[in-house]
Amino acid sequence: MENKLSRNLYMVPYVLWIVLFVIAPIFLVVYYSFFDIEGNLSFINYQKFFTPVYLKMTFSSFWYAFLITAISLLIAYPTALLLTKTKHKQLWLLLIIVPSWINLLLKAYAFLGIFGTYGVTNSFLEVIGIGAQQILFTDFSFVFVSVYIFIPFMILPIFNSLNELNPTLLDAANDLGASKWITFRRVIFPLTMDGVKSGCQVVFIPALSLFMLTRLIAGNRVITLGTAIEQHFLVTRDWGMGSTIAVFLIISMFLIMIVTGTRKRGV
Amino acid sequence: MDKRISPISKLFLVIVFFILYAPIFFLVFYSFNSGGTMSNFEGFTLDWYKELFHDVRLLIIVLNTLVIALLSALISTVVGVLGALVIHSVKRRQTKNTLLSLNNVLIVSPDVIIGASFLILFTMAGIKLGFYSVLFSHIAFSIPIVVLMVLPKLMEMSPTLIDAAKDLGANRWNVLSKVTLPFITPGIFAGFFMALTYSFDDFAVTFFVTGNGFSTLSVEIYSLARRGIALNINALSALLFLFTMLLVVVYYFITQRNKPKGMGVRK
């Protein structure tokens, strides 16, 4: 008979990982949020967070994330729907996913050239007579590039749930006299809600926190929660305030997950 | 269901694919530009590629990135497989769900939070920022992905296989090495591969925990891109694009090869 200790030795690395890299970091972030920049215990960071400056930033961060999610959904849903109707749909899906494997920074960098003052977009605008515009470092370029980056992540879960849809249900709706639109609204869309929800989840949470896009594409015009955290941790070195914002980001993350949570249990 | 796609829908799909791929090809195209900008193409040149291959600093960074990716993927695969075995072995439903939720924390957390909290963690633990801090964080955020890739395979495995092995006199080690591990091999490969790509693509976490002396490709691209347009980044992105396509093909073959085999074992 082997003794119990050695039997359970294999659990050590994984449990150690959970303790060190999952529980400890969250605890440390919360712990640090109670310290001001000099290292004194205080609630000053929380007081600061509830001043108009930070509240406005939080609000605008949520607004941008919402816009990005909504636009991605509007483009991704029809795309996913059409993809399921193509021949070789798995191949097309793979082609949609491939761009998401390319380093995000390179894609952002491409838009520096495309949206730049002498870039392709501006030459095009000149040709059709609108004239060159300042595109880079605006809200528009930030939202556009974010949507560009997130679209594959939105398409994938929607495609999967559409793909699992039982086609006989559509035949049934058709037989019962439902028009295409009614079929979509009453049958297809409700049944693919899970895909939509998880798509929104994978887009919304990162959209709140991507700091490199705001830095590269939006200049410093758009400040998201992520940008603020990066600023506090790496530039001003005010870890307490950075942690406080992180705590609120974590809380909003949990709220989003509850709202978009699917009812599937287990794995 | 209506299987035909109307011309308008086709046009929509074409536009989506165009937008997804145009920036990437745009980058690659201008990497051959002998003029120094991403706006007018003067002539064909391979100078940027030559410059890239003569940049010793960059080559060291590429090497760093590869070493980190391979090491972290290897270690996280080992720990992740152990983790999947731990979760699989837990009988109580509640404990299992708690473990799964803890496992998924790092997957759903925004990179900024992971980066910031790991920065605090490493600073508190007295680990110097650099190679080891980057390696540890890459291992940490890859483990849950490996677990999620391996666990479904474990669930799929019929418990009777293990009972049969035990009846035939196999000890625990034999069961693991002769029955369980061969069965979940496709999951392990997929997990290793995902860990590799996660590590390779990661920017935000690395950006937080890397010190001054150490850099990975993503961090380097970010600091280059913040300085503005330089066509050697284009050349770099062209090479990375090729590399990514290679990975896609490899991944495609791994999954294709595993499909029939996995099914063969299941029956």
Image: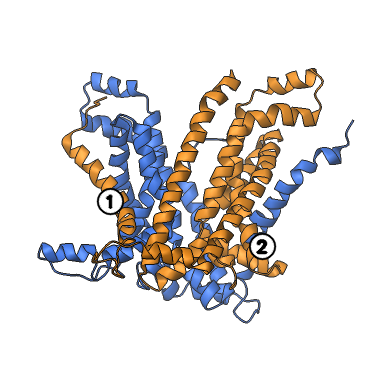
Chain colours: A blue, B orange
Q: Is residue B3 left or right of residue B98?
A: left
Residue B94, how many percent across, how many down? 66, 38
Q: Earlier in the sequence, mark 1 or mark 2?
A: 1
Please state the chain letter of the residue tagged with numbered disc 2 in the rendered image.
B
Q: Residue furthest left?
A: A129
Pick the front one: A22 or A265 = A22
What residue is rendered at 47% in x and 63% in y? Answer: B53
What residue is rendered at 45% in x and 66% in y? Answer: B222
* Residue type at numbered disc 1: Ile
Q: Secondary structure at mark 1?
A: helix
Residue B178, how many percent across, how many down? 72, 27
- According to the image, label 1 marks what residue? B19
Residue B72, how many percent across, how many down? 62, 52
* Residue type at numbered disc 2: Tyr
Q: Is residue A198 left or right of residue B213?
A: left
In the figure, A147 relative to A183: above or below? below
Q: Can you tell which quarter of the image residue A126 is in?
A: bottom left
Q: On residue B132, which mark appears?
A: 2
The image quadrant where one finds the C terminus of chain B is: top right
Circles 1 and 2 on the same subunit: yes
